[in-house]
Amino acid sequence: MLPPKARTSRVTRLHLLQGLKSSKNLNAEEKDLLKQELEDRIGRVEDEMKSSVEKLESELRQLLKQAGLNREEARMKSDLAKLTTLLEERIQSLGEPKGEGKTIVTPPKASTLRKFNYYLNQLLSIKTYKQLVFGVTRWEKQDFDEFGRDPAFEKKVKPLFDFFYHQYWRVSAEGLENIPEQGSALIVANHSGTLPFDGSMIRLAVTNDHPARRDVRFLVEDFVYYLPFIGTFMYRIGGVRASQDNAERLLRKGHLVTVFPEGEKGIGKLYKQRYHLQRFGRGGFIKLALRTNTPIIPCAVIGAEESQPLLYRLHFLAKPFGIPYVPITPTLPWLGLLGLFGLPSKWNIYFGKPITLKQYGKNAIDDELLIHRLSEEVRQTIQEMIVKGLKKRRSVWFG
Amino acid sequence: MMMTSMEKPHRKTPLSERVIAIMGVSGFKGRTILQELENDSRFKKIIVIDRRKPTIETKKSKFYKLDLTEPMVDLRLSEIFKKEKVHTVIHTAFPITPPRHQSLAHEIISVGSMYICNAIADAGVKKLILASTTDVYGAFPDNPNFLTEKHPMRGGIKNRFLADKIDAEKSALRLAQKHPQTVVTILRPCHILGPNIQSYKTNYLSRPFVLTIMGYDPLFQFVHETDVVRAFMKAVEGDYPGTFNIVGNGVLPLSRVIGISGKIQIPMSEFVMKNLIQFFWYLDMSPAPASYLNFLKYICVADGEKAKEVMGFTPQYSTRETLLSFVGAERLRDVDLAEAES
């Protein structure tokens, strides 16, 4: 096995030899590579020929010995010597780059008329323009996820999110060991920060820093999918519409799923209510965990509130855009698109110990009071984690 | 295992003694199922009921001319069923494209299905197979990514053609409730594509420029025509009461569907598109009214798990393969190497 670098260079050389790379655009490095490859090949041919000649010689000698024709040996030897010199000459001539190599390095010149014709064809064909205009949305072989996630698109967007993760919000994740290496789990987190960046940051924390590099799917509020562009964008980066059916399907397939039981109330709370967990809906996530037998991992996100402090909810103008309200923050309507990302506060994400609900059995789903109690317990756990994290924090901007 | 699967259809009447009636053979589904039954040597007698004679050559089928909009059609149907001792009724008498004459469509789809169900109850037919579509769920932004059979049918909101289809399904369900001895199977295929089928959906994809709505890129799901016919044959052979989604595996967003077909996508503003399509619909230039634009905006993807588990039906073509087969036939047709069946 060749070392990886040598292998790649050999592959490129082979490609060059096969003329896959058009010959006139060779630069000095590629020429060197080509020369090396040719020399290698000639060397190999040489070696093979020499070894075969030697083999022939020895065989002949043996045959002669068996036949007892020692007299003839001398003549034979001279003939063989002649043959070898001839062969060597032939090999030498092969070594000179006049055959294969020469044609590749200097191709016959195309006539200017032909060139002109080619460019004219390119200019007149509709294909060129089609590629120019629609080249951006060219389809690739890679298939889509069944929930509409596009891995290719995700790859394009990831550097931006990584910038926010590492440089802008300097997210640090603690307690990642609580997330299982395999199998499904339900990450229940507090929702904050006007715009739901906490979902993607939790996801990046697990994909970037967890030893198993696990993928996390996050559930998104309904109203997002009513909106043009944003709804499609959410589909492509892997968001799933929040519904029991979807979440159950994901958990049964062994995914990690993030839910924000506070929902819209969570990101819609004003700055004065920061870090106060809102009521946890109807306890749908507890039912989900009971039905699919998955552990719940409580998660606290700290720092998102300060990055996008919501000062006022403007209901005027909200309806025509199809959103619940227009948020007023220090940055949002004033800085336009840049304002979407808010201020560079320091984020901390804490993952708590998993809570298993196995002991409650199958009939617990119908026990509404128990479900409510369990959801309240999870809420308390997350609230405690938040209070603990806030005590630890010294500065909003530096952590 | 082998024995039970063999016994199940034979329990009451063997296949060769069953008389199978097809309602409506002018459409693609009815015609192809009739062809399949004609070619199948296990079936001895087929009754064809339609307004027009079947276009394909028939050997063992008997044709009855009947219009579902006639008065007293339920009585005549019941007479035919009793006279021929019909065992199974396959109901595919639906218009292929959304018809412009809405009251006539209502008469055929909604009222006609009710008459058929009444006749079946009266004549004591053993089985009804109804052809529906996953469009009855409707395309909504709050649909789950995979619609199961339990999901409510909301397609009829603002869409009368689909509302009539839902009526037809409901009358079949009512029949199943009132007469539990009758096996009622409702098959809901998603968008059917293939080398032969021609519908308003294939029309949409076979033009060089495909209009889409700016900012929306819903997920699509296709099923191959042969898979649909296989599902119907499975329902004819065995007894599977209930509703089943017949869908191909996998999903593709509309933009990629257009990319694979090699067409040019023209995104339009929703307001312009809506009015343009409605205007073209009045001028008889658009195959569907503007209420169908929801299917270009929001998701309507069904889950085929139940058909797999209960019927043992697995699609042989995935969504992508179905689309490729359709596109391949389109290309051959473009260079006059192949001809459409109808």
Image (cartoon, rainbow, N blue to C red):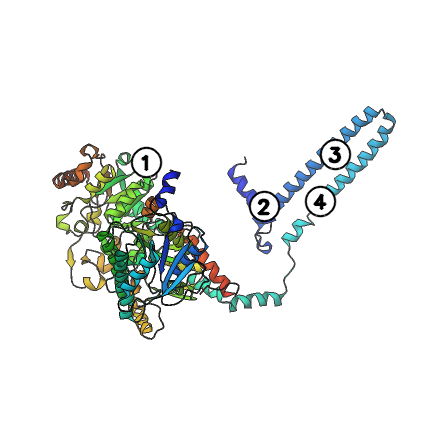
| Chain under disc 4 | A
Sequence-wise first label, 1 or 2: 2
Dot 1 crowding, Cα within 10 Å, few <14, some 14–19, many 20+: few
Q: CA distance from mark 3 to mark 4?
A: 17 Å
Residue under pointer 1: A182
Give residue A302's position: percent from left, percent from top.
21, 43
**In the picture provided, is B268 more to the left or to the right than A269?**
right
Mark 3 or 4, closer to the camera:
3
Q: CA distance from mark 2 to mark 3?
A: 28 Å
Q: CA distance from mark 2 to mark 4?
A: 19 Å
Q: Looking at the picture, which amino acid does disc 2 mark?
A: Leu
Q: Considering depth in this image, is B33 or A258 the residue closer to the camera?
A: B33
Dot 3 crowding, Cα within 10 Å, few <14, some 14–19, many 20+: some
| Chain under disc 2 | A
Q: Considering depth in this image, is B208 or A156 the residue closer to the camera?
A: B208
Residue under pointer 4: A94
Q: Is residue A265 visible?
A: yes
Dot 2 crowding, Cα within 10 Å, few <14, some 14–19, many 20+: some
Residue under pointer 2: A14
